[in-house]
Amino acid sequence: MGSDPRTAEGYGRRDEDLDILLKTMHRRLGIAVVDRLNAHGGPPELRTPDLALDRLLAATHRATGKAVSRRLSRDAHAAQHNSVLQARLGARGPLARRPAMIRVKYREEALRVVHSYWPFDLAEAMRTAVRIVQDLCDLLNDSAQPLGRVDTVVEQLREHLEGMSRRPEPLRPQAAFTGLDYLAAVESALADPAERLANELHSVRELLDEELAPSVATLKATGRAYLFGVGAVAQDLVDDLTHGCGDADALARVVAEVEQASNDFVGADLTGAKLDDVPLEGILWDATTLWPAQWETRVRRASLPSDEEQGVLVVAAEGCGSVVHADA
């Protein structure tokens, strides 16, 4: 027989049932809370007001430090670029220091003059001639080799020297224009070493035709008895050709200077230049180059990054479809 809920015993059982219900609900709520926190990465850290302020200051310091580092890095990059630019400008020769508008105006004519003086690598051609004569000396010293091969090497040397001599004679501009007109200055700079090289080649060909070739011809009748005299002439040829290599190298340096003056417009001011009829292919430029109005976008579309250094662009024969930035 159940107890009466209105009695003291009934009230006690009702409180006990309520306690059990509350504990069960508390346990289930705790499980739900833990699951919820775990789903969001776990319980948050307890932060006192001072700790929260410290963390805020630390986060602000890190953000500020990154901004300062980026700014300093950008300034350092700009300073380095300016240093490289100044070194580049300082290393230019006299022709490259001429006004940029003049250099770009006469660019095509200057490059044409260069090609007439330097139709191919004359320095390498001179070294090839030295190697041919050295091969001749080795052949003369090798008793196992037939003397008939000597004629073949001499003819090879003659043909090689004739190919080098097929160049226009150095043209010296009139004295009144020397140093005043840009193209006259280009021609004059090239003519000096070209004239020395031409004279050296003339002397070498005279030595070949008047001494070496006749001496080699007598070997067929005299045999190796006169090899010493032929060897001495061959060694004179080696010496003369080696000296000519220095003249060819000097001419190569002037050619490089003219090409630099005609192609390198990094840091140049071209705002007043008239570019409508000027061939721009091969020109080097960068963000510091100043172009005439309406020309910079056109040049950018025709330019590609060069292989020389970062930030330097080269005007290509066929540009890209989008604008290339000079700091790319």
Image (cartoon, helix red, strand yellow):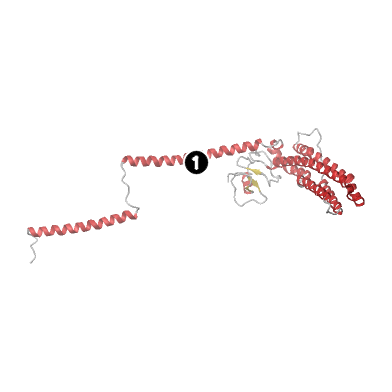
Near mark 1 (Cα within 10 A), the count class, few <14, some 14-19 or many ≥20, is few
Residue positioned 25% across, 56% down in the render: 29
Q: Residue at 18%, 58% (x, y): give it.
A: 20
From the viewer's perspective, tell me whether residue 55 is left or right of residue 144: left
Residue 134: give x, y in percent of width and height. 80, 47
**Which of the 4 image quarters holds residue 208?**
top right
Identity of the residue furthest to the right in this view? 221
Residue 173 horizontal/vertical position (percent): 80, 37
Assign a secondary structure to mark 1: helix
Q: Residue at x 16, y 58 (%)?
A: 18
Query: Camera-side residue: 246 or 238?
Result: 238
Q: Is residue 22 above or below residue 125?
A: below
Above or below, 310 against 22 in this view is above
Image mark count: 1
Q: Where is residue 292 shown, x and y percent of the image?
A: 64, 41
- Up/down of 181 relative to 212, above or below: above
- The single residue placed furthest to the top in the displayed view is 176
Residue placed under numbered mark 1 in the picture: 70
Q: In the figure, residue 86 lies in which quadrant?
A: top right
Amino acid at circle 1: Arg
Considering depth in this image, is 37 or 266 the residue closer to the camera?
Answer: 37
- Quarter of the picture holding the N terminus: bottom left
In the image: residue 187, left or right of residue 43:
right
Whether residue 47 sits left or right of residue 141 in the image: it is left
